Image (cartoon, helix red, strand yellow):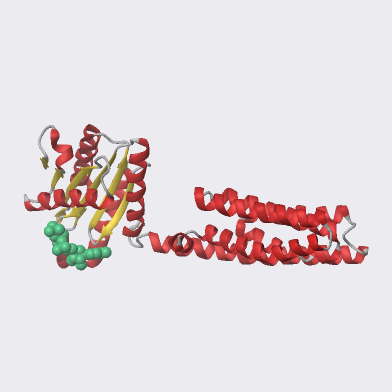
Amino acid sequence: MLYRLKTDFRLSIITLLGISALLGISPFAVMRFAQGNMLAGIVDTTIMLAITVGMVYAWVTGDTDRTGLAMAIVACAGAVTVGALVGEPGLFWLYPCLVSSFFLTEPRYAIFINLAAVLALMVHGAAFSSTIQMWSFSATAVVVSCCAYVFAHRNENQRERLEHLATIDPLTGVKNRRSMDEELAMAAASAARTGIAYGLVLLDIDHFKKINDEHGHSVGDDVLTEMVALIEQNIRKSDQLFRFGGEEFVLLMSGVDETGLRAVMHNLQHIMHKFLKHPGGKVTASFGVALLKNGETPDDWLARADEALYKAKASGRDQIVYADDVSAQGPATETA
Ligand SMILES: Nc1nc2c(ncn2[C@@H]2O[C@H](COP(=O)(O)OP(=O)(O)OP(=O)(O)O)[C@@H](O)[C@H]2O)c(=O)[nH]1
């Protein structure tokens, strides 16, 4: 539970604002019933029920986009209704709702919801004691919305930047190991649910240390970026390449059978032989390949690919070795 709150920004906002709203509104709901203002009490209770349903729905389904949008609409519509029913004292509720809209949903929806809320109160008019008060309220509500928009927009940009930095390898531009762990877990879950076949390739450049030592680190860097570009040009859009570490990469392919996997690997090795070079000659790589087995964990799947890669290195490098499951027909090892 804590992990989800830490990793899912919108779910944490929905939960935090939801609980704050429940704590903030409930005394007023009780007070309104006690004062005999049944309608306002029912509106408060309905808002609290809607917020509770929204929070439960977001936790159960993980659909925080729709829940956030619905909660922003409910909160603003509720604040407008309370304002229209109880007049001036109810108007203040709109301010926190205008701010939270930007955290619950996308800015373009939040702007629309906020403007609609302010306009609805202005058109109704009865909540205000004078025209001046109406315009003052509307102007301050718009200013609050603008400030919240700027803050939420900057916050969103910085969050995206941090997310990018945390998941992308800066040298090659492909996703890093952290993203790979998530994608492998998602692939295993998707295979269990839909039966889609997934293939995994562990790729390691041969004698890369020698390239660095003899030609310099920047040449080594160029080899890494050129190899990534070459692979990305020759795989499907749905395939994903990750930097596992150093000169080791992982290629995750979906919807592949054994024949397809062999064809892709044969093509990749051929392309690398033809185009991947450094000042001292050809650059080769060793490959360990494994198809995901039924019910297999990502760790076991990766371990089988790693074992196959180890065999490829041990039997002379520049080879493709298929893990046990793929080797049912034909030779397990393809030598260049
Ligand atoms: N240029 C460059 N080198 C890197 C980078 N990351 C790791 N390396 C180097 O990659 C080399 C990996 O060397 P080893 O693990 O011995 O592997 P290898 O020389 O390819 O040997 P085999 O894998 O057994 O064929 C080390 O010298 C690392 O310093 C990087 O981002 N850029």
Question: Percent position (x, y) of residue 36?
Answer: 84, 59
Residue appearing at x 11%, y 41% in the figure: 333
Q: Quadrant of residue 177?
A: bottom left
Question: Percent position (x, y) of residue 228?
Answer: 29, 52
Quadrant of the frame with the C terminus: top left
Question: Percent position (x, y) of residue 245?
Answer: 26, 61
Q: Quadrant of ligand 1?
A: bottom left
The answer to whether any part of residue 207 appears in the image is no
Residue appearing at x 24%, y 41% in the figure: 293
Q: 151 or 66: which is nearer to us?
A: 66
Question: Percent position (x, y) of residue 123?
Answer: 87, 52
Q: 88 or 308: which is nearer to us?
A: 88
Q: Quadrant of residue 3?
A: bottom left
Residue appearing at x 40%, y 63% in the figure: 166
Tell me if residue 142 comes above or below residue 316 in the rendering.
below
The answer to whether any part of residue 58 appears in the image is yes
